[in-house]
Amino acid sequence: MSVLAPHHRVMEQAARAAFAKTAPPTAEPAPCSPALTRAQHTKQQRRNRRLDRCESVMELVRNGMSQREISQRLGVDRRTVRRWTRASGFPERKPVYRRSAIDEYRAYLE
């Protein structure tokens, strides 16, 4: 474990603040709908954070920064930076399918 690992969140916030000073202002993301459940709201917030980081990575790539430098600057793993730069657009998360206890017997029950 790295000496800086416990301070990852603080370093990420500092990187965002530094990037925000150099980047042109962008439109604020639309607030979540009040009809969302707490879990859906949290999921939407996390997606927005991933999207912001992905856009930051893509901007730094366009500016000619290496994947290693981007990784260190934003506190994102190099493999994540590589995956995002190779993707044609923002890579959405795959939905998780969890097996049910009755899945094995579903054909019989129907």
Image: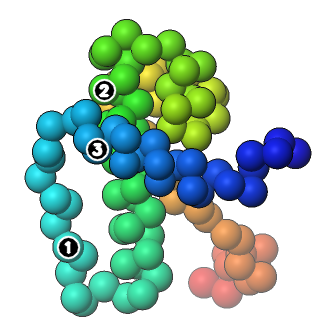
| Image-based side of 52 in relation to 10, left or right | left
75 up-or-down from 43: above or below: above
Give the residue pinned by disc 1.
31
Front: mark 2 or 3: 3
| Image-based side of 100 in relation to 2, left or right | left
Quadrant of res 110? bottom right
Kindly identify the residue that appears in the image at 19 percent across and 60 percent down: 29
Residue 69's x, y, as percent? 54, 21
108 up-or-down from 70: above or below: below
Residue 12's x, y, as percent? 52, 49
- Label 3 Cα neighbours within 10 Å, binned few <14 / some 14-19 / many ≥20: few
Residue 46's x, y, as percent? 44, 63
Question: Secondary structure under badge 3?
Answer: helix
The tag earlier along the polypeptide, 2 or 3, is: 3
Identified by mark 1, the residue type is Pro
Separation (CA) of disc 1 from disc 2: 24 Å
Give the residue pinned by disc 2.
59
Give the residue pinned by disc 3.
20
Question: Secondary structure under badge 1?
Answer: loop
Separation (CA) of disc 3 from disc 1: 20 Å
Residue 34's x, y, as percent? 22, 88
Q: Is residue 33 something that shows in the picture?
A: yes
| Image-based side of 97 in relation to 29, left or right | right
95 up-or-down from 42: above or below: above
Front: mark 1 or 2: 2
Separation (CA) of disc 2 from disc 3: 12 Å
